[in-house]
Every structure is written in C-alpha cells, then in structure tokens.
Image: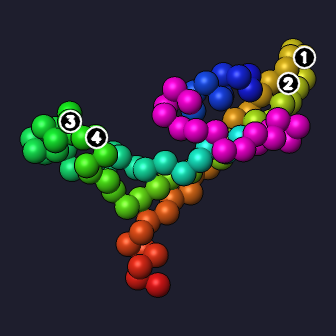
Amino acid sequence: MWPAIREFWQDSGFLIDRELPDIGIMETDWAENRAKIPDSTLRKVIGKVLDQAYSYPERDKFRTRLEHGEDPAPPKSTSAIAARTRSWSASARANR
C-alpha cells in the first residue's frame, strides 16, 4: 500500500519530504495552493507563456498516516489511512 500512497502524492504534483514507513508516516513538501489563483482570461493567456507569472501566498503540506490492523470476523488484514493538512499563508504571517 505504501507505494500506492507515494504514487498518489507524486501524481498530484507533490514532492515527498519525509517517509517513515516503520511508523506509517509520509509527509509532502510545502506546495503552492494554485487553486486560489484567479482564473481570468489574462491569467490563462499569460499562464501559457509564463506559468510562474502568477503566484499565491499560500502553501499546503500533507501528512499521511497508514495503520495496519486485523478484522476478526472473518480474519483478514485491514489498513486505515488518515491525512492531515497544514497551511501557511504569507498574509497571516505578515499580520503577526
């Protein structure tokens, strides 16, 4: 299951920052939250040439925890996956 979780994050455009398979922890690196960049016609035109021309001052980081278990009836192996996100904002930091 570990390779599938790594592949999910990498296919989603995240770099893996930390892997601790012995305790079931995988963490992505900070990534820009590009979903909040306004999707205007000008952005689309400029974005085709210079994708980095627009930036948003928010970053997200994800931590995935994988836990193995047993289902007693009928006996079979199970897995539980939990994900947590942390966000960073330059504007929140500037307001401190």
Graded by Cα atoms within 10 Å as few (under 14), some (14 to 19) or many (20 or more), the crowding at tag 3 reads few
Please give the range of residues in magenta: 10-25
What element does badge 3 sit on? helix
Q: Name the residue under label 2.
A: 71
Mark found first going from the N terminus, 4 or 2: 4
- Which amino acid type is marked by label 1? Pro
Mark found first going from the N terminus, 2 or 3: 3
Q: With 84 as the anchor, is 13 left or right in this view?
A: left
Graded by Cα atoms within 10 Å as few (under 14), some (14 to 19) or many (20 or more), the crowding at tag 2 reads few
Q: Distance between the residues labelled 4 and 3?
A: 6 Å
Locate the N terminus by quadrant.
top right
- Which amino acid type is marked by label 2? Asp
What element does badge 4 sit on? helix
Q: With 36 as the anchor, is 79 left or right in this view?
A: right
Task: Check if mark 1's residue and mark 2's residue have beta carbons within 8 Å.
Answer: yes
Residue 76 found in image quarter: top right
Single out the residue that lies furthest toward the front.
Answer: 49
- Which amino acid type is marked by label 3? Val
Q: Name the residue under label 4.
A: 51
Q: How far apart are marks 3 and 1 (CA)?
A: 56 Å
Q: With 24 as the anchor, is 45 left or right in this view?
A: left
Q: In this view, does 70 lie above or below 41?
A: above
Find out whether residue 19 is within the magenta segment. yes
Seen at 85% across and 20% down, the residue is 77
Single out the residue that lies furthest toward the bottom.
Answer: 96
Q: Where is residue 63 in the image (x, y as percent from the top left)?
A: 65, 46
Q: Mark 1 points at which residue?
A: 75
Q: Mark 3 points at which residue?
A: 49
What element does badge 1 sit on? loop
- Between label 2 and label 3, give the one nearer the viewer: 3
